[in-house]
Amino acid sequence: MKILIVGWGYPPKIDGGLDIAVKELFQGLRRQGIDVDLLLPEDRAPDMENIIPVKVEGDMCSKAEDLSRKAAEKAPEYDIIHTNDWFGVEAGFKAQKYSDIKWVSSFHSISSSRSRHPSERIEKLEKIGVNHADVVTAVSDKLSLEIKKEYGKRPATVYNGFSSISEEKKIKLEYDRPIFFFVGRHAEQKGIEHLIYGFKKFLEENNQGTLVIGGKGHMQDSFKDFVEILEIGENVEFEGFIPEDELGSYYSAVDVFVSPSINEPFGLTISEALSTGTRVVCTDSGINELLPSETITLVKPDSDSIKKGLEKSLQKTPPKIEERSWDKMAEEYVKIYRKLV
């Protein structure tokens, strides 16, 4: 059995949780002795055994087309092609069409959950990925039900592993306590504006505290402007991209991690924070399906709910969780593969 995975990034060159999940699947399959290769854009592909770099150009859709051409060329060498989200759909479709390869199509999110105005082209690709692959999976029941509502077919659920994160490089945060922390893409889906406004309301009643915002994205300047408009610049720190070897120490150094997403199909940052023993405030997410309710403070993606959640979380005892290993996720995919070949 020989597997070809189509990915988009590989740590440290990542856009989000999808890239981490693909890396963990690739490595988990190799640990189990599965013959697997990973196809990646050349500028994001590390120089590693079993990783195939592909020269890509243009916007994301053009790059996805470049990946698909390479995947179709390589397909006869493999038994299964495993794609992820919309950018891999054309690769899976072409490979399936022009060879005897079986196609597993995994979804980590869909475009309607990422934006109020999703791309028609991407939605068309998602529909193909749901309705033409031999097996379709989603990272949570939450996402699976959203896909059924949007495209008429419910994928099987294969949960990600719980990301525990090491504290390789120690950092110290010299900010006013309590310290609240967010890290992730600065995009509409992540609900950062609701967190900022909720934190403003928290300050009005509690006088002190710091909100540390990590990550980057196309809306970062808008969020910085919003902080200035609310006149809370002295209490909000934008850290930018946080290297992987520092991230664990950020989680440990703060009082509360906040995930205010409007839609979060899984939520790897939640598991990362919990693995360091940090309290978590979060909106409804896929990972909540696997967590005892007492381990998190659940809020809605609006400022009043988040403000109350920040206050409530400080009264909680730091949580302990039982992890789900990435190897468990890889084992579940191996069972899927074996049924296809």
Image (cartoon, helix red, strand yellow):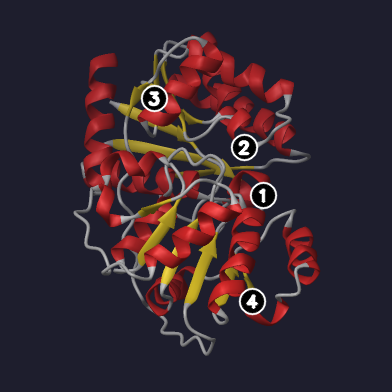
| Mark before the other along the chain sequence, 3 or 1 | 3
Q: Please name which of the two marks, 3 or 1, marks the residue nearer to the observer.
A: 1
Mark 1 highlights which residue? 187
Residue at 62%, 30% (x, y): give it: 111
Q: What residue type is labelled 2?
A: Arg
Q: Which of 276 and 236 is in front in this view?
A: 236
| Mark before the other along the chain sequence, 4 or 1 | 1
Q: In which quarter of the image is residue 233?
A: bottom right
Q: Is residue 33 visible?
A: no
What's the CA distance linking mark 1 and mark 2?
A: 8 Å
Q: Sort mark 4 into few (<14), some (14-19) or many (20+) by Cα contacts within 10 Å.
A: some
Residue at 28%, 23% (x, y): give it: 337
| Mark before the other along the chain sequence, 2 or 4 | 2
Residue 215 is labelled as none
What's the CA distance linking mark 2 and mark 4?
A: 25 Å
Q: Is mark 3 on a helix, strand or loop?
A: strand
